Amino acid sequence: MVFPNNRMRRLRTTDSMRRLVRETTVAVDNLVYPLFVRKGRGLKEPIESMADCFHFSPDMVVKEAEDVAKLGIPAVLLFGLPDKKDKTGSEAWSEDGAVQLAIRQIKKAVPQLVIITDVCLCAYTSTGHCGLIKDGKVDNDSTIELLAKVALSHAQAGADMVAPSDMMDGRVKAIREALEKNGFPDVAIMSYAAKFASAFYGPFRDAAESAPDASTGLTDRKTYQMDPANVRQALAEIALDIEEGADIVMVKPALPYLDIIYRARQRFDCPIAAYNVSGEYMMIHASASAGHIDKDAAIMESLTSIKRAGADIIITYFAKSAAKILSLPH
Ligand code: PBG
């Protein structure tokens, strides 16, 4: 059918007409809101590198979790900061660590909210690496034992889902086994399966105080996180994590890696999550603050593109903003 029988603009004439033929929609059901917790009482401290984000103490994060649930967002993703860092990151599996305390309090106050926890060592180790350092290298096999301990401590505190973000080999299997063996068969695993060594984590590393320490001689995470140039390898990582027992697989970051999300969607049937990371967040924020772009429109356009590429779940610091935008009348 050619012009004038075919006029593509006919279906774009009004907002209602456009809604009728819209192929992709972002729903509040798809969103996960990340939260940062640290020990203390009465704390809600603005995070300098990430506008509108805060460090909460466990008592204060409860109110925030209630607000998140009221907006209809089904899940939060918890990150913790320790009081003290050490070589092994031991506070990560402490029964009274900030994350473990926060889980218990949130579960009590907002039981319907899905609590996902980030499982990693980088915020807890004095080296700032996601694993133990042995002979000048990030050691895989001793690290995954510790990650299993961290995941188990989160499950014991009441987490519904654990999300390992370290990129060690075999960690999903180690975590799955630890959960099964200790009576947590229903705790789900969302693996950061295809996580790239990205410049877009910068604001987060300031927020989590988790940048690799220069004294280790290893100033980046390129020996464990993926090379941004690789797509086949990303699919291999995802396939392995599914085989090891991941329930949900993640691609991270989101916007510079939409092709990875798309390819993963073609190949795998399990739910796919995408992490719209701190750098992506701050680019929109900074640009909107400078008056260059319309913030709400940019938020919804990026979330829509992530969904269109094939993600089911979007982890985003814009979750609350998006929930508010989505609840506005047409
Ligand atoms: C920890 C972790 C990171 C992020 C989530 N978990 C940082 C990193 O790998 O250095 C990044 C999240 C973001 O930038 O929003 N391993």
Image (tube, helix red, strand yellow):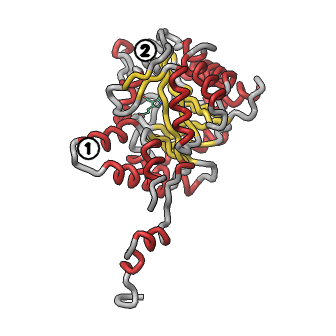
Relative to residue 214, is residue 163 depicted above or below? below
Task: Report if the beta carbon of the residue with label 1 is closer than 8 angstroms to ligand 1.
Answer: no
**Figure quarter occupied by ligand 1:** top left
Relative to residue 312, is residue 48 depicted above or below? above
Q: Nearer the viewer, mark 1 or mark 2?
A: 1
> Pointer 1 and pointer 2: residues touching (CB < 8 Å)?
no
Residue 119 in sight: yes
- First in sequence: mark 1 vs mark 2: 2
Q: Disc 1 designates what residue?
A: 287
Q: Position of residue 69 (x, y in %)?
A: 57, 39
Q: Nearer the viewer, residue 39 or 162?
A: 39
Q: Residue at x 55, y 27 (%)?
A: 62
Mark 2 surroundings within 10 Å by alpha-carbon count, few (fewer than 14), some (14 through 19), many (20 or more):
many
Q: Residue at x 45, y 47 (%)?
A: 324
Q: Tag 2's secondary structure?
A: loop
The answer to whether residue 291 is left or right of residue 133 is left
Q: Quadrant of residue 97?
A: top right
Q: Tag 1's secondary structure?
A: helix
Q: Residue at x 36, y 50 (%)?
A: 296
Q: Nearer the viewer, residue 5 or 101?
A: 101
Relative to residue 274, is residue 203 depicted above or below? above
Q: Position of residue 152 (x, y in %)?
A: 67, 23
- Count the numbered circles shown: 2
What number is the disc on residue 223?
A: none
The answer to whether residue 175 is left or right of residue 125 is right
What number is the disc on residue 127?
A: 2
Query: Looking at the rendering, in which quadrant would you find the C terminus?
Result: bottom left
Q: Nearer the viewer, residue 204 or 267?
A: 204
Relative to residue 2, is residue 237 depicted above or below? above
Residue 130 in sight: no
Kind of residue at disc 1: Ser
The answer to whether residue 148 is left or right of residue 234 is right
